[in-house]
Image (tube, grey):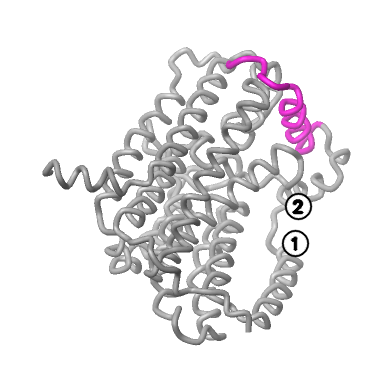
Amino acid sequence: MRAGHILRVLRKTDWLLLFATVVLVLFGLSAIYSVALSHSDTELLNVKKQLLAGVIGFTLFVFLTLVNYRLLRSYSLVLYLLGLMCLLAVLWFGNTIRGTTGWFDFGFLSFQPVEYMKLALPVALAAYLSERARRHFGWRELLESFGITLVPVIFTLLQPDLGSAMLLLAIWGLMILFAGIPRLQFFLLTGGGILLGVVAWFFLLADYQKDRILTFFEPERDPLGIGYNVTQAIIGVGSGGWFGRGLGFGSQSQLKFIPESQTDFIFAVIAEELGFIGVTVILLALGALLWAIMRRARTLTDDFGAFLMVGIGGSLFVQSVVNIGMNLGLLPVTGLGLPLVSYGGSSLLFTLMMLGIVNSVARSSPQAGSSMIEWKGR
């Protein structure tokens, strides 16, 4: 690669995006290391797995940065169908962990297909919606885009993984709002969502999923079960103070009071051990990351790139809000991790790939002008 080309790439790189990404990954590795100490994991196996996923992920980040993101539009159908095949195959050949059959086990590493679908679905929807952005967005476009989303949602619910299924629906919802869904369709869609929620409660949700929701409203109904998880996380968050107890010295995390401390409740571990200062750095990094993505989406003149940015940014935003809300007792426990921070090789790998695509958009697209996609408000 010529020196001139390297300089052009570096000049067009979104350094705020990259800096925020590195900060979040490092905080995640530090928290996972701390949890490993509490579990007497002298070989630091989970830390090594996460570090390996991070190295591979950053390699793919660089690769996707250098590739023109518009090529994804040509392969959107292939990427989408591959995701459906993986989601279907995992139901028969996948490994079951905590009641969810959602992982392919390859020994040292495991692969969670729904994490791949969190990348493939925004690409597929961006390709579909970008072809219709300048035309009337009617019922046909609404139903067809919903159909594209519904198939992976159903496969994900069969695992069952309610949190990821709801995230896929949220990605679709944010992208059609960006497309300019008319207000009538918006209100009818909201009513349909409420009706679907009622149907899901009686016919689709498993008992443990209902218990999570009920316990969110009434924590005292299961203080030593599902309610215990949230209670201990809140205690951990509240006990951190300004500067925390120190990495590896949190009583809640080190004495194993906080369950799923390296995945669902890693935010509570950071809050207890690194305190208000550590939490502030996490929130600022997440805010900078999302601002860098949405800033670019508002100024793009390429519809495919704009939709892609909204889908990726929306996915990271929803996951962050839900995970932090879980740790603070403000939202029900859904099993969604904190992007780039929570333990999970598949999640870290595909999140870094998504951010590589975002950086490719930043590198390849001019910022001048305004997006051609606007809220129509009909």
Badge 2: residue crowd in 10 Å (few <14, some 14–19, many ≥20):
few
Residue annotated with mark 1: 201
Label annotation for residue 313: none
Residue 238 among magenta residues: yes
Q: Which residue position holds label 2?
A: 210
**In-image side of 187 versus 264 (left or right):** right
The vertical placement of 286 against 85, above or below, is above
The secondary structure type at the circle numbered 2 is helix
Left or right of 51 on screen, residue 197:
right
Give percent across and percent down for residue 256: 67, 21
Distance Cα–Cα, label 1 vs label 2: 7 Å
Q: Is residue 100 above or below residue 176?
A: above
Element on which disc 1 rests: helix
Q: Dot 1, crowdedness within 10 Å: few (<14), some or many (≥20)?
A: some
Upstream in the sequence, badge 1 or badge 2? 1
User: Residue 359: horizontal and vertical position, in percent?
Assistant: 36, 50
How far across and how far down the image is residue 32, in percent? 52, 25
Residue 157 lies within the magenta run? no
Q: Quadrant of the C terminus?
A: bottom right
Tell me, yes or no, whether the two marked residues, 1 and 2, touch with CB atoms within 8 Å. yes
Report which quarter residue 126 is drawn in. bottom left
- Which residue reaches farthest left? 2
- 242 or 176, which is in the foreground? 242
The disc labelled 1 sits on which kind of residue?
A: Trp
Q: Residue at x 63, y 26 (%)?
A: 277
Q: State whether residue 300 is above or below residue 12.
A: below
Closest to the observer, 94 or 21 = 21
Residue numbers of the magenta segment: 224-247
Question: Label 2 is placed on what type of residue?
Answer: Lys
